[in-house]
Image: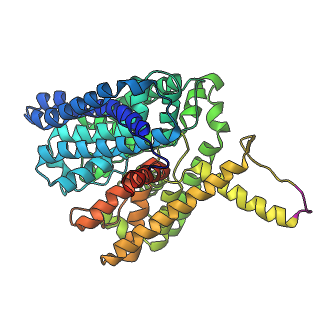
Amino acid sequence: MMKYITKTDLCIVTRYSGVVMICVGLMCLSPLLIDLIYFEFNYSCFIIPGVFSVILGYICMKTLDKYSRSKMKLKHGMMISSIAWMWACIVGGVVISLATGTDFLNGIFESTSALTGTGITMFDNVEILPHSILFFRAFEQWVGGLGVVVMVIGVLTRPGTATAKLYQSEAREERLKPSVKTTLKKTIEIYLIYTIVGIILYHLAGMPTFDSICNTFCMIATGGMSVKNANIGYYHNDLIYLISIVLMILGATSFLAHYKIIKTKGKSLIQDLQFKTLICIITFVTIILYLASHIVPIDLLFTVTSSITTTGANVQLASTMAGWPSFILVILMILMLMGGSSGSTVGAIKLYRVITYVKAIYRHIKEILSPDGRVIPIKISGRRVSEKEIGKTGNFITLYLVIIAITWIIFCFYGYPPFDSLFSIISLQGNNGLDIGVLNNTLNPVLKIVSVLNMWVGRLEIYPVLVLFRAIFEIFKK
């Protein structure tokens, strides 16, 4: 008899997963207009997987509709979120495989990389891909930037407990409004405004319209997958580089800080600890690396920003970056581990956790030096951090590093260079996308599967996947 998972739990998860399947199917239909505009005639590659996902989702939703009134718990939300992301990656992978002729594993890798905002590609030459597929990859990044489940509940679901639990399941806690539903609508509004502004700025800087749309989708979502082989470096335009840097920083800033900008006349950004930390790190690291290496300043600024915002866009080829001094690559790895603000589109550990972790270590040192019995609270931006939150932060960082270590061992077992492998694994786990020559079409198939799991686990921040695996174990155990 199952201890933690009941039949009702499975029905609730299946019912709400059906809603997500419908949205994933609709997402697959989004490139049809692009396909028609460019006369590519790949419409069946989008329609077949898309309609299949919609029909299957509708069946799950309608068959188990009575469970829509059942109380949703956090464990349900986490399982739904895990299933939703994997389903979206698989269906997107089918679309890419059908339209490009690549094998199914490469298709899933590409789709997972796009949706999770990792931005690594398995294609040696993306410039020969159909425009519809280039748009589809960019749109996947844009949707994945906010989160597949977040997009679904922001558009379709009713306000209530279920919405709140689904929101929490994608590691989101901040609210712009008392209602989660209203919060998500405001978040999507902000996201749309920045997207439109980005497209206009790129276009004014001389970028073609199609490129402007796709690159904005990628940059504001901190995804980094471009429509050119040389990524943003293709354009050789400092203004485009600067616009990209601004979009990456906007994407890596908490939506709560964005929402307060108008009300506080910009003071919310100046007062936001994560934003101040982000800007200070980018400035300080760029200056230090320039003084130590004499690499072109705009290239360094772009790469540092791309690293800490987990965008993974680049202006230098992977082969060029591989030739940079080792200490620069180590610093980039540290930045990729840290990530940007909580409540934004970024991956990795995130600055709020890093700040909490550092403050906890400092508090421990003060407690050792202080008189017995003295209570030293930890405060961030005037708010007291609970002991439970401090414990959760430490647990998460430990799990995060353990997964990196396990993946690193697997890569080394297959004969890949330890240093290069570590760089790539940190990039995968943090959904970053920067690479120095390891992650490409020649990667061992086993390591491609491991990489897909890394990106999936990293985007969901580990716990939802562990909850799903535990549930599967409960179902199949004797």
Q: Position of residue 42 (x, y in %)?
A: 10, 36
What secondary structure is the stretch in magenta mostly built from? loop
Residue drawn at point x = 22 percent, y = 41 percent: 134
Left or right placement of residue 420 versus residue 396 in this view: left
**In the figure, 421 relative to 332: above or below?**
below
**In the figure, 306 relative to 160: above or below?**
below
Magenta region includes residue 107: no
Residue drawn at point x = 36 percent, y = 43 percent: 83
Residue drawn at point x = 14 percent, y = 35 percent: 48
Q: Which residues are magenta?
A: 370-374
In front of the other: 345 or 28:
28
In front of the other: 356 or 381:
356
Instruction: Residue 397: name its quadrant.
Output: bottom right
Q: Position of residue 102 (x, y in %)?
A: 14, 53
Magenta region includes residue 371: yes
Q: Is residue 246 visible?
A: no
